[in-house]
Image (tube, grey):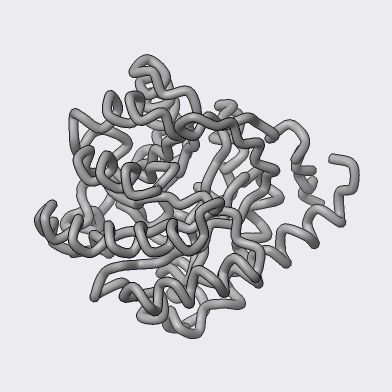
Amino acid sequence: MVPIRVPNFAAMQQTWRIKDRLVHPTFPLVMGIINATPDSFHAASRADVDEALRMAERMLADGASILDIGGQSTRPGSGEGTAAEELKRVLKVIDAVHRRFPEVLVSVDTWRADVAKEAVAQGAGLVNDIGAGLLDADMLPTVAALGVPYIAMHMQGTPATMQHAPAYTDVVAEVTRFLSERLNAAHAAGIADVVLDPGFGFGKTVEHNFALLRGLGRIAALGAPVLVGLSRKRMINEVLGTRPEEALNGTTVLNTIALVNGAAILRVHDVKEAVEAVKLVAACHPGT
């Protein structure tokens, strides 16, 4: 029988500096996705301001600890778009959510330093960067100056090219090494609090994704909280023969496996089910 990893939730506890205050996140956390874009792969997550406020209220009632708001599509094959377009989409949503729910931690999903800066000024308290500081050389020093936590994600290629025959010799080793290097780079730039994301679906085949899920503990061993974004993705749909709108059950199964393997944050479209997974995994391992 394969041994089951017991997650040490107590060891995940940290103190985050967010601008001028200290926050004590209790991991695992659930991050709800709100897309201020017209072409998110999961149509139900696309939102204008009014819909974003309704989604935020529902996600918070369901137990979300973070709301992740993005204005730039990163689906496979998507174009880059302009900074002006991204700012127009994302700032009004972040501003509205922050005004309605001022105590809630809002994350901005962007790889652009200028967007991160403006978003934090509008109320965001965390930067979620698919480029890990490599798509915009100003990102790491900008986040350090802003004084907020930072999520660094692994991606092979760019959203436009990442699914063009991704290849690795050892995907777990290569992603772990990359994230270790970006963790060190972020700390060297002056960013105190870093979260690592292996980037499921970003320049990986289905086989690569499942290898990363099995090997998640190696990334967690780097000592930073690990975020996983598995929600309704291709790795589920190809195995089950489902579409994104049919992939909630598969998402919950993989989120549960991720938690057992050491995930600290679940980035999801469906908060209620993710929170239930967190509670049930915690109940299996009381005192950890």
Residue 145 is drawn in which quadrant? Answer: top left
Give the x, y percent position of residue 155. Answer: 31, 45
The answer to whether residue 210 is seen in the rendering is no
Q: Image check: 57 left or right of 163?
A: right
Give the x, y percent position of residue 168. Answer: 34, 42
| 192 w.r.t. 196: above or below | above
Residue at the image point whose x is 39% and y is 48% from the top: 123
The answer to whether residue 64 is seen in the rendering is yes
Residue at the image point whose x is 50% and y is 84% from the top: 246
Give the x, y percent position of residue 139. Answer: 25, 32
Residue 41 is drawn in which quadrant? Answer: bottom left
Give the x, y percent position of residue 148. Answer: 43, 33
Total count of labels: 0
Q: Residue furthest front?
A: 99
Q: Quadrant of the C terminus?
A: top right
| 65 w.r.t. 13: above or below | below
Residue at the image point whose x is 43% and y is 79% from the top: 244
Q: Residue furthest right?
A: 286
Q: Image check: 89 left or right of 263?
A: left
| 95 w.r.t. 246: above or below | above
For the residue pair 42 and 120, the one nearer the viewer reads as 120
For the residue pair 91 and 67, the one nearer the viewer reads as 91
| 190 w.r.t. 32: above or below | above
Residue 222 is drawn in which quadrant? Answer: top right
